[in-house]
Image (cartoon, coloured by chain):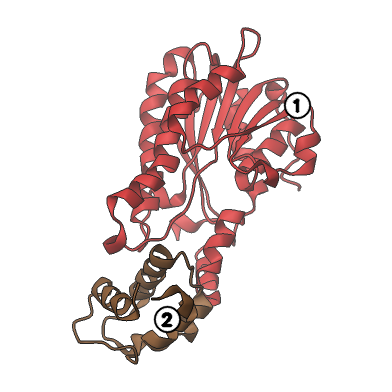
């Protein structure tokens, strides 16, 4: 069974904002949304990385923007909407991974990670949740990580930043429920993406094998995670909010 | 950065208690473990913008070999 064998009619013509759209999970989500005839505004820092087939799709608009420019996020979203076009969904895939031992983790380093993984996410959420930017019944999905609930040496920053997202999801889901806007998190295990490729370069083959063995179903692919995100964006999940759903090949229960 | 300065700073980050020289074997230090390898990678990346790989860590023995892997031209 192909993981793209599904049809969410409720996503047709919906307008979805995706960060981290040029690679990994964000790219897979954008592609699958376009397959459902949704319109996608994809934000990426390095737009030269964009897939040709995404670029050619008339329902895909690519926006080059550096999410570290947190104070510019409000302008960015204001310029994407008009009285005829507001967003129906937001998927936050942008983020970075970091392995730094605690004794070297001074606060300016942590702040840099948090700027991308947490503060830009909160600012995007804050602006997205304004009535002029999003429709009622919108759905928001944050990509956290199984590492948001688990620990690992060298990951004080990364784990805590992904944990922070879970707190954002729970509180904002309650705050936005009046407008029937839902907020959920998807927590992947290790998914084969450019982010994890970079991680694997730094560790030995034995270590990579050991990490793979910790996933009963092996490493994941982006197309294993994207369908759940589409479900959460669709009307099929209209009673699901404030949740964190792990998609991890069994990693977190082993 | 001078070589001895680098060695002293790294020794401090690794919390090594004995005196070390350029010929000291890093991996024979009592304080060397997988966390030590992480500290080494992060410290070298911060100080020189050089990212050591898992293979580099396997091949490095003394502080001298580490300095050579980073690149002698990066030191005063």
Tags 2 and 1 touching, CB below 8 Å? no
Q: Residue at x 30, y 81 (%)?
A: B4
Label 1 crowd (10 A; few <14 / some 14-19 / many >=20): some
Q: Which residue is drawn at 56% across and 58% down?
A: A196
Residue B68 or residue A40, whichever sits in front: B68
Which of the chains bears the disc numbered 2?
B
User: In the picture provided, is A152 more to the left or to the right than A74?
Assistant: left
Residue A216 showing in the rendered view: no
Which residue in the protein does label 1 denote?
Answer: A59
As drawn, the chain in red is A
Residue A102 showing in the rendered view: yes
Q: How far from the left and from the top, in percent, is residue B40?
A: 37, 73
- Which residue is farthest top? A83
Q: How far from the left and from the top, in percent, is residue A148?
A: 40, 48
Q: Marks 2 and 1: which is nearer the front? A: 2
**Dot 1: element:** loop
Q: How far from the left and from the top, in percent, is residue A115?
A: 40, 40
Label 2 crowd (10 A; few <14 / some 14-19 / many >=20): some
Which residue in the protein does label 2 denote?
Answer: B67
- Which residue is farthest left? B17
Which of the chains bears the disc numbered 1?
A
Q: Residue at x 65, y 22 (%)?
A: A15
In the rendered image, the vertical position of residue B9 relative to residue A85, given as above or below: below
In the rendered image, the vertical position of residue B67 relative to residue A165, given as above or below: below
Q: How far from the left and from the top, in percent, is residue A249?
A: 56, 55
As drawn, the chain in brown is B
For the C terminus of chain A, which image quadrant? bottom left
């Amino acid at each position: 069974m192909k993981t793209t064998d599904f049809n969410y009619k409720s996503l047709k013509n919906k307008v979805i904002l995706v960060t981290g759209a040029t690679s990994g999970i964000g790219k897979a989500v954008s592609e699958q949304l376009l397959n459902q005839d949704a319109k996608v505004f994809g934000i990426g820092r390095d737009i030269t990385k964009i897939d040709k087939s995404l670029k050619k799709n008339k329902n895909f608009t690519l926006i080059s923007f550096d999410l570290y420019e947190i104070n510019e996020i409000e302008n960015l979203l204001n310029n994407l909407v008009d009285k005829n076009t507001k967003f129906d969904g937001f998927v936050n895939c942008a983020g970075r991974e970091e392995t730094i031992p605690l004794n070297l983790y001074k606060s300016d380093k942590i702040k840099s990670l948090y700027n991308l993984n947490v503060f830009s996410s909160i600012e995007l959420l804050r602006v997205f949740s304004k009535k002029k930017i999003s429709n009622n019944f919108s759905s928001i999905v944050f990509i956290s990580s199984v590492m948001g609930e688990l620990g690992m040496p060298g990951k004080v920053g990364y784990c805590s930043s992904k944990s922070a997202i879970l707190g954002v999801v729970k509180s904002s889901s309650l705050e936005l429920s009046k407008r029937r806007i839902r907020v959920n998190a998807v927590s992947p295990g290790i998914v084969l993406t450019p982010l994890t490729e970079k991680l694997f370069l730094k560790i030995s083959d034995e270590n990579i094998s050991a990490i793979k063995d910790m996933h009963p179903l092996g490493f994941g692919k982006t197309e294993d995670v994207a369908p759940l995100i589409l479900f959460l964006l669709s009307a099929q999940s209209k009673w699901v909010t404030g949740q964190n759903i792990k998609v991890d090949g069994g990693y977190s229960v082993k | 950065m001078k070589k001895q300065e680098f060695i002293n700073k790294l020794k401090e980050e690794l919390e090594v208690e004995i005196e070390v020289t350029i010929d000291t074997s890093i991996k024979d230090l009592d304080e060397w473990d997988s966390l030590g390898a992480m500290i080494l990678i992060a410290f070298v990346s911060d100080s020189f913008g050089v990212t050591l790989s898992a293979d580099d860590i396997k091949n490095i023995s003394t502080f001298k070999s580490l300095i050579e892997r980073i690149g002698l031209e990066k030191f005063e």
